[in-house]
């Protein structure tokens, strides 16, 4: 007798506003045998809100290998499984892509339901070009790896999209300003679909200055304009005196201001400090 295989469903969850979940996602979550969640505590709140009571198991970055085998075994036994992340589309910058690859390799059917995705939502509202873009996800916490990643994108002409956590934001902005130039345009989207949703449209240099004095809150989507084809070889053409004026206007003084301008434009710290002294004396 031929064995009947199960099916894997990728179910997007709201990125903020619970009203954004679809009826089809809710119907699927109610019908499956098991729900695999990035964080069962977060997902339990969502499921309780909609009155869904189903077996729940954790599936996240640090257990994806052993739990992937567990989920595959259930699928091969004919069970249906829904994969959900804390927010947004499973498989985008999370281990959902690993279980999909495992299913494809073993002939398990995979169905992705359409729904919320933070980077797509931020992109279309950013005002940046949307015809061609590259999604770069989260940058490394390692400074060397992060800078190497950004330097590899110096000549990228497509709109670039990144995810970033608040505690890493300032370091990422500094490194972006150094790699792409302080005058490169950026849109920082935070708290998307939530009460305090915000889009900050500025430049990398000004964003670095702003968040030196204003603590970032919430998860960020960063939309960075691509390089101009004819300027792709010169990404550090910003005026250090203009950037220093921005620092001073934001209340940043002395060596702190010099450090920001130095990091953003790749000029020596003592040269940046001389500019500060010139503008404040």
Image (tube, helix red, strand yellow):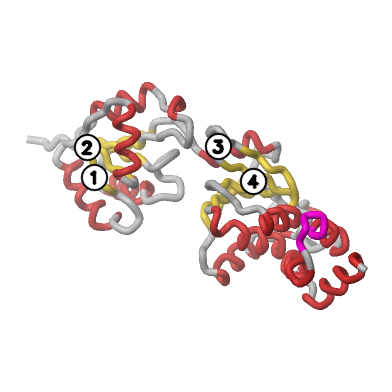
Q: Which mark is residue 237?
A: none
Give the labeled residue for mark 4: 188
Q: Above or below — where is 272 with respect to 232?
A: below
Query: CA gap, disc 1 to disc 2?
Result: 8 Å
Tell me which segment is drawn in magenta.
247-252
Give the labeled residue for mark 3: 192
Q: 85 or 72, which lies in front?
A: 85
The secondary structure type at the circle numbered 3 is loop
| Horizontal relation, residue 66 to residue 147: left or right | left
Give the labeled residue for mark 1: 57
- Tell me residue 154's x, y (percent): 69, 60
Say which quarter of the image contains residue 250. Answer: bottom right
Q: Are marks 1 and 2 in contact (CB under 8 Å)?
A: yes
Is residue 249 located in the magenta-colored stretch of the structure?
yes
Within 10 Å of the Cα at label 2, are there few (<14), some (14-19), or many (20+) other Cα atoms? many
Tell me which label, 1 or 4, sits earlier in the chain: 1
Tell me which label, 1 or 3, sits earlier in the chain: 1
The secondary structure type at the circle numbered 1 is strand
Query: CA gap, disc 1 to disc 4?
Result: 34 Å
Q: Above or below — where is 84 with respect to 227?
A: above
Q: Above or below — where is 196 with respect to 224?
A: above
């Amino acid at each position: 007798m031929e064995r009947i295989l199960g099916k894997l469903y990728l179910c997007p969850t709201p990125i903020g506003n619970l009203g954004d979940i679809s009826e089809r996602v809710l119907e699927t979550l109610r019908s499956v045998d098991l729900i695999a969640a990035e964080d069962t505590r977060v997902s339990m709140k969502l499921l309780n809100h909609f009155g869904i009571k189903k077996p729940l198991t954790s599936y996240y970055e640090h257990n994806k290998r052993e739990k992937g085998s567990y989920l595959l075994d259930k699928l091969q036994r004919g069970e249906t499984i829904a994969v959900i992340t804390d927010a947004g589309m499973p498989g985008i910058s999370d281990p959902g892509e690993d279980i999909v690859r495992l299913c494809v390799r073993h002939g398990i059917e995979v169905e992705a339901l359409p729904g919320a995705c933070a980077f797509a939502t931020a992109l279309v509202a950013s005002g940046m070009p949307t015809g061609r873009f590259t999604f770069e996800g989260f940058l490394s916490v390692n400074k060397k790896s992060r800078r190497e990643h950004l330097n590899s994108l110096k000549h990228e002409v497509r709109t670039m999209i990144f995810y970033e956590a608040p505690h890493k934001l300032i370091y990422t902005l500094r490194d972006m300003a150094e790699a792409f130039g302080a005058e490169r345009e950026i849109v920082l989207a935070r708290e998307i679909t939530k009460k305090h949703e915000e889009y900050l449209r500025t430049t990398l240099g000004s964003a670095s200055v702003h968040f030196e004095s204003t603590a970032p809150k919430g998860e960020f989507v960063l939309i960075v304009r691509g390089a101009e084809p004819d300027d792709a070889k010169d990404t550090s053409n910003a005026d250090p005196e203009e950037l220093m004026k921005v620092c001073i206007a934001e209340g940043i003084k002395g060596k702190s201001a010099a450090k920001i301008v130095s990091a953003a434009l790749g000029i020596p710290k003592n040269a940046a400090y001389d500019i500060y002294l010139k503008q404040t004396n």
